[in-house]
Image (cartoon, rainbow, N blue to C red):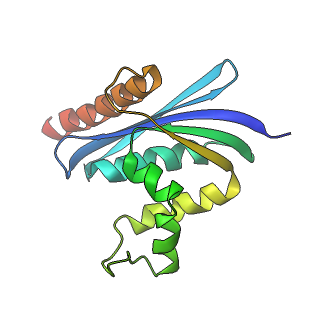
Amino acid sequence: MLRYIEIFTDGACSGNPGPGGWGAVLRYGTHEKELCGGELNTTNNRMELTAVIMALSALKEQCRVKLVTDSKYVSEAIEKGWARSWQKNGWRKADKKPALNADLWEQLLKLLDKHYVEIEWVKGHAGHPENERCDRLAVAFYKNLENKKTE
């Protein structure tokens, strides 16, 4: 039987592009693990994608995953099949323009093939405890990056 893991993710950016961070909380039963990271020059969408990629990459075996995100970019591109279409069309959207963040989508689609993932979208900054926690992790990380840059 596959383990059931809850994953909560968020990405944040100061400017878009600008310094950004991502945060994730993984929950297995009563056990929790926090992950975070970031980049000095990135976008909010890249951080949202990176949070999901890093969280799924932390799983050591195939799992059933409930992924909770406040990113419509991530949730809709997966649920509505857009990301798979972009991939099939050589990372081009329906309007023939290049799909953004193809490098990250490529990684994420491989991870989605490995696990059984259901996605739940939640409204950001609306009091969802784990989403708020992920946002604090992401913001704290990029603020730390900004501070190091100015030192």
Identify which residue is drawn at 67% across, 17% down: 30
Q: Quadrant of residue 32?
A: top right
Task: Say which residue appears at 37% left-offset and 33% top-offset.
Answer: 123
Residue pictured at 61% horizontal, 32% vertical: 6
Depicted 18 relative to depicted 81: above or below: above
Is residue 60 something that shows in the picture? no
Q: Could you tell me which quadrant the N terminus lies in?
A: top right
Q: Is residue 52 visible?
A: yes
Residue lying farthest to the right in this orientation: 1
Name the image quarter holding the C terminus.
top left
The total of numbered circles placed on residues is 0
Residue 132 lies, in percent from the top left, at 38, 24
- Residue at the location (46% across, 37% down)? 9
Looking at the picture, how far across and down is residue 141, in whole percent?
32, 33
User: Looking at the picture, does residue 7 appear above or below residue 76?
Assistant: above
Percent position of residue 87, x then y: 50, 74
Q: Residue furthest front?
A: 80
On screen, residue 9 versus residue 119, left or right, reads left
In front of the other: 63 or 150: 63
Figure quadrant of residue 86: bottom left
- Nearer to me, 117 or 149: 117
- 41 sits left or right of 82 in the view: left
Give percent across and percent down for residue 45: 33, 51
On screen, residue 103 versus residue 29, left or right, reads left
**Would residue 127 appear left or right of 8 to someone viewing this image?**
left
